[in-house]
């Protein structure tokens, strides 16, 4: 739903008690009363104390951007893992906000606890939440082991893994469907995709890869969500190549790009090679798309909706994948058997022979990992 009113408040730094200052809070509270506002939303992260103080001033519910994003995630979580991850994020967000009398937990997915006076009820609620957090973490750990098994199986198949990343609603799932002829749910909504889907991708000249769709990113992605979805997001960090989808029709695509790369850094995926794909050329101003391509050499402009640019994207993916791996020869002394195991973990050993004092290995491995074995490299 559209907001009934918006207000931009400029301050040199947030005010500890109310974030926007008590005077401005009183002024906006009068406006909220006049407009019969039910919920006041801050596009910032509020501390539990600030949120509590603002609720008293506005005399209605006050939520921050984290709560809104969590609510959207909760609506779109349909798989078991997705629902558990969202619930975990909700509990982690709510835990520090258990303060004083009348704490309400009914908004949480599990619906635990109602309102109850006194420290005893507060401690009970806290204990129940911590117990539930522990249970969810154990369940996610079990699901994560299954994902690790599937990831190792994909590695044994010796197919490169490509992950689609991008700002929420940039058209990742539409592009995924266009590339793989899949039927992944596509909606014009924020965070419509929460669970990763993997399909085989047929590329030009007989090349093949595995393509993974991922959850959409957003600027200042809440820490609670990064932590809760870490196991899912780690699929990105373990990929050989990223297709970074940008909404070419967005008013500020540069901010989208910066936001996505910020999250990639947070999940240790900054070093994964990236192919930037400017999407929605069917509705984006041509000059805007050209500017993005010029600013990002090697990028490709496409319309996942109409299919325009798909052949160019396929060729670019083949070239990008060829750059992601290197074939090298390594000579490892017998006393460094630990390195041989590490080499097997990091790449595909094409040939292995034994000399008098060392093992000679011909290996194909990610280019980003080559520097770790540079000391043992031979021409």
Image (cartoon, helix red, strand yellow):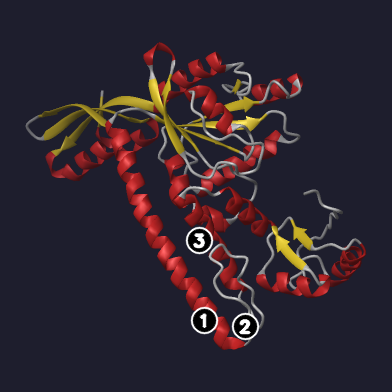
Q: Earlier in the sequence, mark 1 or mark 2?
A: 2
Q: Is residue 98 left or right of residue 214?
A: right
Q: Is residue 374 visible?
A: no
Choose between 223 and 308: the one closer to the eye. Answer: 308
CB atoms at circles 1 and 2 under 8 Å apart?
yes
Report, in whole angstroms, how far the alpha carbon at label 3 lies from the one at label 2.
23 Å
- How far across and down, in percent of the image, does residue 335 sit? 13, 44
Q: Which residue is mark 3?
A: 88
The mark found on residue 116 in the picture is 2
Picture quarter with the C terminus: top left
User: Around disc 1, counting alpha carbons within 10 Å, would you say few (fewer than 14), some (14 to 19), or many (20 or more)?
Assistant: few
- How far across and down, in percent of the image, does residue 6 sit? 85, 53
Report, in whole angstroms, how far the alpha carbon at label 3 lies from the one at label 1.
18 Å
Query: Helix, strand or loop at disc 1?
Result: helix
Query: Helix, strand or loop at disc 3?
Result: helix
Q: Which residue is mark 1?
A: 124
The residue at the point 52 percent across, 81 percent down is 124
């Amino acid at each position: 739903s559209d907001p009934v009113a918006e207000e931009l408040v400029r301050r040199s730094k947030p005010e500890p008690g109310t974030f926007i200052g008590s005077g401005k809070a009183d002024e906006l509270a009068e406006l909220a009363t006049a407009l019969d506002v039910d919920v006041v939303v801050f596009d910032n992260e509020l501390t539990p104390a600030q949120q509590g103080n603002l609720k008293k001033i506005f005399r209605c519910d006050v939520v921050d951007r984290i709560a809104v994003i969590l609510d959207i995630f909760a609506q779109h979580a349909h798989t078991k893992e997705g629902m558990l991850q969202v619930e975990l994020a909700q509990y982690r967000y709510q835990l520090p906000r258990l303060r004083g009398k009348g704490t309400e937990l009914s908004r949480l997915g599990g619906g635990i606890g109602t309102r109850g006076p006194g420290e005893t009820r507060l401690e009970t609620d806290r204990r129940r939440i911590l117990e539930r957090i522990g249970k969810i973490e154990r369940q996610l750990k079990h699901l994560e082991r299954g994902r690790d098994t599937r990831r190792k199986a994909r590695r044994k198949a010796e197919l490169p893994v490509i992950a689609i990343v991008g700002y929420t609603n940039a058209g990742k799932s539409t592009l995924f469907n266009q590339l793989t002829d899949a039927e992944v749910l596509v909606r014009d909504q924020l965070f419509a995709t929460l669970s990763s889907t993997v399909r085989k991708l047929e590329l030009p000249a007989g090349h093949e890869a595995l393509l993974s769709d991922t959850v959409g990113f957003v600027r200042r992605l809440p820490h609670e969500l990064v932590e809760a979805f870490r196991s899912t997001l780690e699929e990105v960090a373990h990929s050989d190549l990223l297709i970074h989808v940008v909404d070419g029709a967005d008013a500020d695509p540069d901010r989208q790009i910066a936001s996505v790369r910020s999250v990639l850094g947070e999940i240790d995926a900054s070093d994964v090679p990236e192919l930037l794909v400017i999407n929605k050329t069917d509705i984006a101003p041509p000059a805007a798309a050209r500017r993005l391509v010029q600013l990002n050499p090697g990028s490709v402009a496409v319309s996942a909706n109409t299919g325009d640019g798909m052949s160019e994207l396929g060729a670019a993916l083949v070239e990008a994948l060829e750059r992601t791996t290197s074939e090298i020869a390594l000579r490892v002394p017998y006393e460094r058997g630990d390195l041989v195991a590490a080499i097997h973990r990091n790449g595909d050993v094409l040939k292995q022979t034994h000399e008098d004092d060392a093992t000679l290995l011909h290996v194909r491995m990610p280019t980003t990992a080559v520097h770790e074995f540079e000391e043992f490299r031979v021409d």
